[in-house]
Amino acid sequence: MSLTSALCPFILVLLLSACQNTTITADLTHVPEISEVDKKYANIYQMLEGKWAGKFYIYKDNERINKDEIDLTELKPEIFHQPGLQLLDSIIVHQEYQSVTPYFQRVTITDYYPAQQKTVISRGVNKIEKGELVCIVIKPDDTVIHKGILESKKTIIWYRSEKRPQRKEYFRETVDADNYRIIGWGYYSGDDPELSPRLWFKGEYIRE
């Protein structure tokens, strides 16, 4: 399956609507039974297999504009050169992915926050369930569930939209042989969804 650029606006509308992740169970142990519709995604997470290390950056936009003035599906590195973006935090990240089946992959994420001298360990899975790409990450204080769209063999778009509290996110993750890059944005409690996102994210990892 591939996602053409024409579908990106549709995914954005889906994300900014009332779409919820309520049908997905946050279970890291159960390996779903594979149906015929799942088989086209066999080994889609294999590109992530192994260990990665790098940094994850969080930016705040101090000059937000009307969301209709920006294409929120066109995520390029140049975004982080725009005026008004303020670096809030940089996190040192180690991630390890291990596939159990061609459709189910476990991940351990170790985040170190230098400013707070704090380490946070999270565990999760990437899986195919009922014809959908699903990513679940269980943190010490939160459970995060994203659904995915396969944009290309190297790129997955992950998104979620929750109302109470408001948490709307969109990430483009691209992986090649030795590099893993993330660009994304998020709206959270108190953010005006009619404006461009308040928070922007960038991840740059290399294979260990």
Image (tube, rainbow, N blue to C red):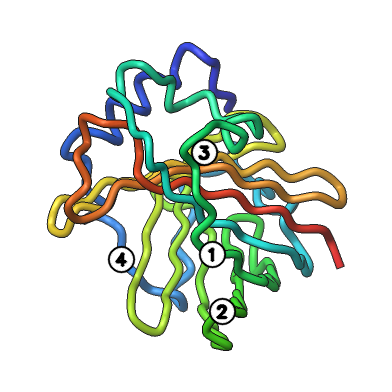
Q: CA distance from mark 4 to mark 2?
A: 34 Å
Side of 189 where 40 appears, left or right: right
Marks 1/2: CA–CA distance:
8 Å
Horizontal and vertical percent position of residue 107: 60, 71
Q: Residue furthest top?
A: 6
> Compared with residue 172, is residue 10 higher up or lower down, i.e. above or below?
above
Does the rendering let one see residue 64? yes
Callouts 1 and 2 close, C-beta under 8 Å: yes
Q: Amino acid at mark 1?
A: Asp
In the structure shown, which secondary structural element does the residue marked by tag 4 occupy?
loop
The residue where tag 3 is placed is: 157
Image point 54% across, 83% down: which residue? 121
| 3 to the left or right of 194 | right
Q: Which mark is residue 25?
A: 4
Quadrant location of residue 117?
bottom right
**Image quadrant of residue 64?**
top left
Mark sitting on residue 165:
none
Q: Residues within 10 Å of mark 4 (few under 14, many from 20)?
A: few
Give the SS element for disc 1: strand
The tag earlier along the polypeptide, 2 or 3, is 2
Mark before the other along the chain sequence, 3 or 4: 4
- How far from the left and from the top, in percent, is residue 115? 56, 79
* Marks 3 and 4 close (CB-CB < 8 Å): no
Q: Is residue 131 visible?
A: no
Q: Sequence-wise, which precedes: disc 3 or disc 1?
A: 1
Name the residue type under label 2.
Ala
Q: Nearer the viewer, residue 23 or 142?
A: 142
Q: Which mark is residue 115?
A: 2
Q: Earlier in the sequence, mark 1 or mark 2?
A: 1
